[in-house]
């Protein structure tokens, strides 16, 4: 048995793909969501059909009390051994930095940065040998935007993901001696609802020619990288940021 895995933003897209692949690999899964309870329920049902246990837990990762409750509820499945910080947003309106509102930018950093901090903190408090835990692994979902900058669309989002990568490196160094590995996956263009929900319905088609492999990724392809970093096969990997961007 692989243990208990919490996936934030686990109801759709990359998060749902991580949950379903994790079930095949023997994990019990906690599917975190904010709005789409129906989608979260479908993921839970799939995990259970794979013979694993699962819970859907609503929590806004930017709210400390809700994150604490998420981890306390997850403990009903047993000791938490893995965390995937996948929940993230791009903001209300894509565009230049000088066109963004302070409230929209703050919300992006609240979810993408503070949310990762809160969930990682709660995970460390449960996994670390310093607190009597048996160790574990954390994978944060970054983006190739942290390196590319996302000029003209989501500079603030790119900056938030750069913060996630720095947090990944620093936390990995802090807890390496406490049997916790911390890594990140930085996806490039992925076929999810994120683009359409931001009003950029043609974004994948428009940018596909800039990808050396000629196409966006499927969520399942990102999930493979995440599950590898969680697994014993990646036992010597910590503080790494693995770009999965098709060469872009």
Image (cartoon, grey):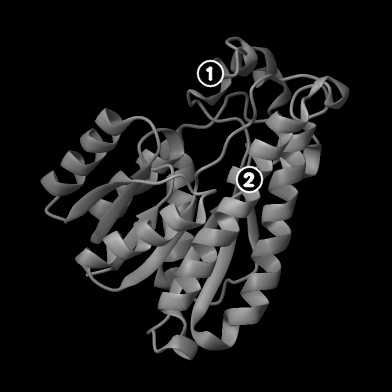
Residue at 46% over, 41% down: 221
In front: label 1 or label 2: 2
Q: Tell me the quarter of the image containing the N terminus.
A: bottom left
Q: Which one is nearer the viewer's eye here, 52 or 130?
A: 130
Q: Secondary structure at mark 2?
A: helix
Query: Which mark sits nearer the N-terminus, 1 or 2?
Result: 2
Residue 189 position in % (x across, y down): 61, 30
Residue at 29% over, 45% down: 20
| Residues at marks 1 and 2, CA–CA distance in whole angstroms | 19 Å
Residue furthest right in the image? 98
Residue 133 position in % (x across, y down): 39, 84
Residue at 38% over, 33% down: 12
Q: Secondary structure at mark 1?
A: helix
Residue matched to label 1: 197
Q: Residues within 10 Å of mark 2 (few under 14, many from 20)?
A: many
Looking at the image, residue 115 sits to the left or right of residue 167; the answer is left
Looking at the image, residue 22 sits to the left or right of residue 145; the answer is left
Q: Which one is nearer the viewer's eye here, 99 or 63?
A: 63
Q: Which one is nearer the viewer's eye here, 218 or 181?
A: 181
Q: Which mark is residue 110?
A: 2
Q: Tell me the quarter of the image containing the C terminus.
A: top right
Residue 40 position in % (x across, y down): 28, 37
Classify residue 11 by image quadrant.
top left
**Residue 25 seen by the camera:** no
Q: Residues within 10 Å of mark 1 (few under 14, many from 20)?
A: few
Is residue 219 depicted above or below 120 in this figure?
Answer: above
Looking at the image, residue 96 sits to the left or right of residue 9; the answer is right
């Amino acid at each position: 048995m692989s243990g208990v895995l919490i996936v934030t933003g686990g109801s759709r897209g990359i998060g749902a793909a991580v949950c379903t692949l994790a079930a095949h690999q023997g994990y019990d899964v906690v599917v975190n969501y904010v709005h789409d309870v129906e989608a979260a329920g479908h993921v839970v049902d799939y995990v259970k059909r794979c013979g694993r246990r699962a819970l859907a837990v609503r929590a806004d990762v930017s709210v400390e009390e809700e994150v604490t409750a998420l981890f306390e509820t997850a403990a009903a499945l047993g000791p938490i051994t893995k965390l995937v910080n996948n929940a993230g947003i791009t903001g209300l309106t894509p565009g230049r930095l000088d066109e963004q509102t302070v409230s929209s930018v703050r919300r992006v950093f609240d979810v993408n940065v503070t949310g990762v901090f809160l969930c990682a903190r709660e995970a460390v408090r449960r996994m670390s040998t310093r607190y009597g835990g048996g160790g574990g692994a954390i994978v944060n979902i970054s983006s190739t935007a942290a390196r590319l900058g996302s000029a003209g669309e989501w500079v603030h989002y790119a900056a938030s993901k750069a913060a996630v990568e720095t947090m990944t490196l620093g936390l990995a160094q802090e807890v390496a001696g406490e049997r916790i590995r911390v890594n990140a996956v930085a996806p490039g263009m992925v076929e999810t609802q994120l683009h359409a929900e931001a009003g950029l319905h043609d974004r994948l088609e428009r940018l596909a020619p800039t990808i050396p492999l000629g196409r966006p990724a499927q969520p399942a392809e990102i999930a493979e990288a995440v599950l590898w970093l969680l697994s014993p096969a990646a036992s010597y990997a910590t503080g790494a940021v693995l770009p999965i961007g098709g060469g872009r």
